Amino acid sequence: MDLSPEDLARIAAVTLAHYNQHADGFWEGTRDHDVSQNIAALLRHIEAEPPFAILDFGCGPGRDLTTFKQLGHHPIGLEGAARLAAMAREHSGCEVLEQSFLQLDLPPGRFDGVFANAALFHVPNQELPRVLRELHATLKSGGVLFSSNPRGDGREGWNGERYGTFHTLQDWRGHMMAAGFVELEHYYRPAGLPRDQQPWLASVWRKPNHPERPA
């Protein structure tokens, strides 16, 4: 699929407009979702000394920012939908960067962890390598990225007013490894159900430590 700059702008605008329009309903529908398994998967693989600097990528209205803050860490949100970003600041009291996933401006080597829960599947396949490289760059050496995406068969396109790419595990591994990440674990959610009732693929990845070069 060859998407033009105009196509990409429309994908971002329409998808973000959907989230802005439905911000209140999105908060009510997701505020009580239990993603403790995912938060624990990120935190247990971070090898730095806590508290951790964490980027909540696609933080929505701030549910998980609040959890990371209550656990004693230093989370910063990133959200493209203006209404959700405002809600996240109000609910969590955290800094929230208002940035489209397709137009990121992230500081290099800043974060111990990136938490991308139900977010990266909105990035069109052709733009994903660049976005993953940008997330790789914003992690500290040895930092960890968690992602959760709908378990899919490779299809890409519109689902109503939201654009998504539905990755297989094999394809997702290929993207992550090409961006320089090393796989730590993967699992399907919700836990304890038959595979055909587990629509989410979760995976955890490390940015490798690079030894100092001799002077």
Image: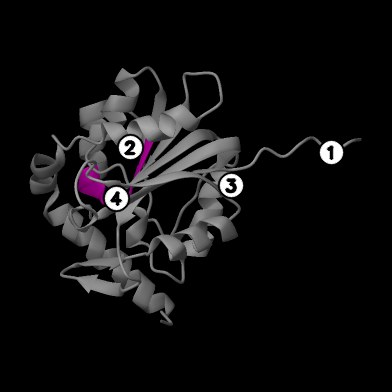
Q: Residue at x 47, y 35 (%)?
A: 113
Circle 3 residues within 10 Å: few <14, some 14–19, many ≥20: many
Q: Which residues are magenta?
A: 76-84
Residue 137 disc label: 3
Tell me which amino acid carries mark 4.
Ala
Circle 1 residues within 10 Å: few <14, some 14–19, many ≥20: few
Say if the magenta span includes residue 82.
Answer: yes
Tell me which amino acid carries mark 2.
Asn
| 109 w.r.t. 104: above or below | above
Q: CA–CA distance between discs 4 and 3?
A: 21 Å
| 169 w.r.t. 84: above or below | below
Of the residues under marks 3 and 1, which one precedes in the sequence? 3
Q: Which residue is mark 1?
A: 213
Of the residues under marks 1 and 4, which one precedes in the sequence? 4
Circle 2 residues within 10 Å: few <14, some 14–19, many ≥20: many
Nearest-to-viewer mark from 3 and 1: 1
Q: Which residue is mark 2?
A: 38
Of the residues under marks 2 and 1, which one precedes in the sequence? 2
Q: CA–CA distance between discs 3 and 1?
A: 19 Å
Of the residues under marks 4 and 3, which one precedes in the sequence? 4
**Residue 119 as seen in the image, left or right of residue 15:** right
Residue 75 disc label: none
Q: Residue at x 28, y 65 (%)?
A: 13
Scheme of colours in the image: one colour
